[in-house]
């Protein structure tokens, strides 16, 4: 495989700057910066990417540059794959719809039986093919402005010291969403793939990435049983006791469920009482539905992010059970002040110097007034790992101009 010219500094050897959010805590985050020359790779196919990543249990430092667009939905020879290629055991969507139509199956129990088992097996086959696991001491980085990973589910799982930068990560769609008639009053379709998931991992820096649904948005899907056929799950989740994570200068757009921090209300399950420490800064959240982010338990610093609303916006920041969110100097445009926040069992959030449509706004007071609640205003901690906080009035121009893949300076 080709490697970057030795006469130029390798961008993959850049480490997280000092004090740049929670990922700078304790040991800091250096990714694969210590990689030996033989562990620096340039990849342009799925097979090359898998070979370069190697065994996730191998902690050898490595730098992997992605060149051009790489599509997960391809076979070993690079030929395209469709949903039909993943289907097994007689699964087909028309048969699934016929079997679990509420007029036939009812609305009191989740699907079971041969077609549901075929759906699960088909999903498992697809997951094995499209899921890519990143191990410890790795930097995964796009070369230039057009590096993209399409249809991959990137998982940073039980790893330490990982950097992912300058990549467009798009359309991680599930060919086999499950119908659940018991989910809500009308039932829901639930997909299971995230574009990126940080799971049980520490010291992770995700910077200058673009995440979206590409040319396959959920808004373009049909209705089945009167409910949207949703083929996407999260864009960028941090779950299962992950800790010391910085999300900076990313562009997330055109999606419903965005960033979940903590995936259970039971803190003992992953020992999360003193984990889920995450910083989000200078991210561009555009035309999103919810979870930007939705937080459980963690000390989460949300600052200098720019939010632009769109159709389908429900809320931006979710105050979940045990959460300790410190939200300062963010800017929200085209978003109702009362819908900047929502509460999922949380008790308080520190929110200071935030703008709504250009006006300094107490978003906690706006939420409380609209909902008749008494959400507290002290999350109980003050962030210290902060290199610089820009004035919120600068974000409308600063963040969209600098966030996302292809905009590294």
Image (cartoon, rainbow, N blue to C red):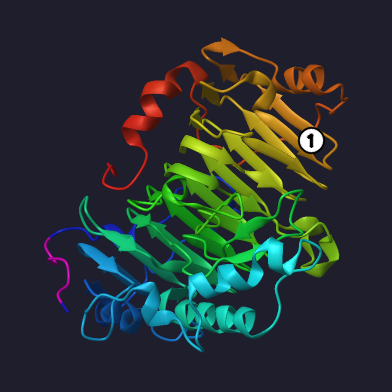
User: Which residue position holds label 1?
Assistant: 379
55 lies left or right of 114:
left
Residue 30 seen by the camera: yes
Query: Is 252 inside the magenta-drawn segment?
Result: no
Q: Residue at x 37, y 48 (%)?
A: 210
131 lies left or right of 354:
left
Q: In this view, does 343 lie above or below 230?
A: above
The quarter of the picture where the N terminus appears is bottom left
Looking at this view, is 17 or 189 the one in front? Answer: 189
Q: Main secondary structure of the magenta part?
A: loop
Looking at this view, is 275 or 341 the one in front? Answer: 341
Q: Residue at x 41, y 47 (%)?
A: 220
Magenta highlight range: 2-7
Looking at this view, is 280 or 385 the one in front? Answer: 280
The quarter of the picture where the C terminus appears is top left
- Residue 103, picture quadrant: bottom right
């Amino acid at each position: 495989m080709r490697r970057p010219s030795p006469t130029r500094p390798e961008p993959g050897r850049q480490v997280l700057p000092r004090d740049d959010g929670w990922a700078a805590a304790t040991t800091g985050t250096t990714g694969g910066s210590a990689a030996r020359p033989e562990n620096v790779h340039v990849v342009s196919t799925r097979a090359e990417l898998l070979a370069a990543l190697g065994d996730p249990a191998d902690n050898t430092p490595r730098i992997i540059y992605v060149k051009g667009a790489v599509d997960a939905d391809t076979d070993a020879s690079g030929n395209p794959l469709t949903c039909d290629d993943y289907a097994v055991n007689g699964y087909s969507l028309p048969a699934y719809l016929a079997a679990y139509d509420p007029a036939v199956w009812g609305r009191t129990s989740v699907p079971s039986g041969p077609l549901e088992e075929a759906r699960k097996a088909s999903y498992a086959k697809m997951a094995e093919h499209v899921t890519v696991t990143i191990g410890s001491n790795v930097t995964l980085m796009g070369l230039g402005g057009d590096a993209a990973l399409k249809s991959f589910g990137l998982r940073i799982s039980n790893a330490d010291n990982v950097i992912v930068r300058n990549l467009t990560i798009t359309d991680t769609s599930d060919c086999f969403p499950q119908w659940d008639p018991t989910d809500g009053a009308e039932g829901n379709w639930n997909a299971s793939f995230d574009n990126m998931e940080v799971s049980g991992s520490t010291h992770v820096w995700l910077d200058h990435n673009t995440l979206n649904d590409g040319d396959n948005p959920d808004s373009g899907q049909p209705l089945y049983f009167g409910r949207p056929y949703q083929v996407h799950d999260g864009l960028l989740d941090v779950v299962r006791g992950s800790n010391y994570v910085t999300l900076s200068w990313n562009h997330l757009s055109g999606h419903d469920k965005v960033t979940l921090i903590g995936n259970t209300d039971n803190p003992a399950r992953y020992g999360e009482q003193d984990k889920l420490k995450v910083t989000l800064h200078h991210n561009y959240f555009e035309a999103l539905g919810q979870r930007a982010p939705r937080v459980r338990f963690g000390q989460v610093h949300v600052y200098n992010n720019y939010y632009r609303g769109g159709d389908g916006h429900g809320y931006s920041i979710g105050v979940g059970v045990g959460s300790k969110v410190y939200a300062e100097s963010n800017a929200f445009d085209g978003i109702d002040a009362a819908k900047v926040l929502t509460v999922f069992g949380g008790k308080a959030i520190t929110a200071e110097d935030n703008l709504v449509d250009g006006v300094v706004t107490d978003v906690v007071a706006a939420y409380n007034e609209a909902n008749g609640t008494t959400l507290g205003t002290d999350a109980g901690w003050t962030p210290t790992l902060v290199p610089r906080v820009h004035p919120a009035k600068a974000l409308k121009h600063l963040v969209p101009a600098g966030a996302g893949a292809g905009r590294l300076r």
